[in-house]
């Protein structure tokens, strides 16, 4: 059985109708952020008021499998030492002077439940964002626990609720749920299945990705996180390799890419493996390290004749720009999956 990419399916009404559940969930990303922010508003206000009665934590520990997103946002900003702990339990030194954050969008993750229970046992301050009455909520019950209830099961929306709290207590950057939701809505409009592929950035990106092995790079901490998530989405969509990493890890891949031969016949039998493509996720970060890394990647790509595509973020805040990059990549992966045909 062979597979090939049929770009006509991206504007085919029947194909788009069959993919509606997948595309609709992407389109509703902004709505989920607004719903979580609205439903958790009262609990967040209570938590902020309560935090005034507590001493500032010695350190912040983000526990559980979803801690990596918090790390990407908080590491450059948190005024106290910050540690992400995605494994079971907590660091041995965590105790009553520390704040433990637990993100559990589904509420049923045993690793998150274990971390929450361990934090309560040690007397840590605990803030948990999870569905009320869930496994994690039950294990997090304690004197120093604050629960921010969630309902959508969406990782980003749940994280925004937590980040809004941390912003208000001076432990994180401005999150602003509405700015995140607006950025997601802007992407959903621009990448809508009802927009022709000629003016649809996600459909155009899917076409560019179709016959390539993507190498995805983001310069800032959050853009790098988005790059990993986009690469995961592409791998799931087409079952083919997609790499994401730091510039030092991706440069050898680009340097090893065979130079393009203008006389190659793409339709010949026994055609070569998919060509390498560099996908740059640009969230507007312009510090010296990012500029230098981007320059080296682009120079190597130009030298090897590697195609380069860039996705530019929209949004007022760092979290909003991360969300827009992630959603644009997710739309492209969805269209990539839609256009894939097996014979």
Image (cartoon, rainbow, N blue to C red):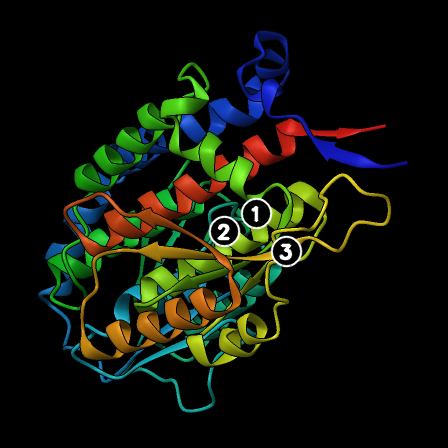
Q: In this view, does 185 lie above or below 316?
A: above
Across and down, in percent, residue 88 comes to 58, 73
Across and down, in percent, residue 64 comes to 50, 66
Which numbered mark, 2 or 3, is in the foreground of this view? Answer: 3
Q: Do the residues labelled 1 and 2 touch (CB within 8 Å)?
A: yes
Tag count in the figure?
3
Q: Please tell me how crowded label 2 is: few (under 14), some (14-19), or many (20+) other residues with Cα within 10 Å.
A: many
**Residue matched to label 1:** 233
Question: Which quadrant of the rendered structure holds the N terminus?
Answer: top right
Q: Label 2's element?
A: helix
Q: In this view, does 66 lie to the left or right of 212?
A: left
Q: Label 3's element?
A: strand
Q: Is residue 14 above or below residue 241?
A: above
Q: In this view, does 33 lie above or below 214?
A: above
Q: Nearer the viewer, residue 38 or 134?
A: 38
Residue at 54% from the left image edge and 70% from the top image edge: 254
What is the distance, in whole Å, between disc 2 and disc 3 at their CAs?
Answer: 18 Å
Q: Which of marks 3 and 1 is nearer the N terminus?
A: 1
Q: In this view, does 332 lie to the left or right of 182?
A: right
**Residue matched to label 2:** 230
């Amino acid at each position: 059985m062979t597979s090939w990419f049929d770009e006509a399916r991206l504007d085919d009404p029947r194909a788009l109708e069959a993919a509606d559940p997948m595309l609709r969930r992407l389109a509703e990303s902004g709505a989920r952020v607004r719903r979580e922010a609205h439903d958790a508003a009262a609990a967040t206000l209570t938590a902020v008021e309560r935090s005034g009665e507590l001493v500032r934590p010695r350190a912040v520990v983000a526990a559980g499998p979803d801690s990596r997103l918090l790390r990407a946002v908080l590491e450059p900003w948190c005024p106290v030492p910050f540690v992400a702990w995605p494994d079971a339990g907590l660091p041995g030194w965590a105790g009553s002077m520390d704040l433990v954050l637990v993100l559990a969008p589904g509420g049923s993750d045993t690793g998150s439940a274990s971390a929450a229970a361990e934090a309560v046992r040690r007397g840590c301050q605990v803030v948990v964002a999870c569905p009320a009455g869930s496994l994690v909520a039950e294990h997090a019950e304690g004197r120093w626990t604050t629960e921010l209830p969630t309902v959508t099961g969406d990782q980003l929306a749940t994280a925004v609720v937590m980040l809004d709290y941390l912003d208000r207590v001076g432990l994180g950057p401005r999150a602003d749920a509405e700015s995140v939701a607006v950025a997601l809505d802007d992407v959903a409009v621009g990448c809508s299945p009802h927009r022709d592929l000629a003016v649809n950035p996600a459909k155009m990106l899917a076409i560019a990705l179709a016959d390539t092995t993507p190498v995805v790079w983001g310069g800032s901490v959050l853009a790098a996180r988005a790059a990993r998530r986009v690469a995961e989405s592409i791998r799931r969509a087409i079952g083919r390799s997609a790499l994401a990493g730091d510039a030092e890890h991706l440069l050898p891949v680009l340097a090893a890419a065979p130079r393009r031969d203008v006389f190659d016949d793409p339709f010949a039998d026994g055609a070569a493996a998919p060509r390498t493509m560099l996908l740059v996720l640009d969230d507007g970060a312009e510090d010296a390290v990012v500029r230098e890394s981007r320059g080296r990647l682009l120079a190597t790509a130009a030298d090897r004749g590697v195609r380069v595509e860039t996705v530019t973020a929209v949004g007022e805040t760092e979290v909003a720009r991360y969300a827009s990059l992630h959603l644009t990549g997710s739309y492209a992966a969805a269209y990539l999956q839609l256009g894939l045909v097996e014979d």
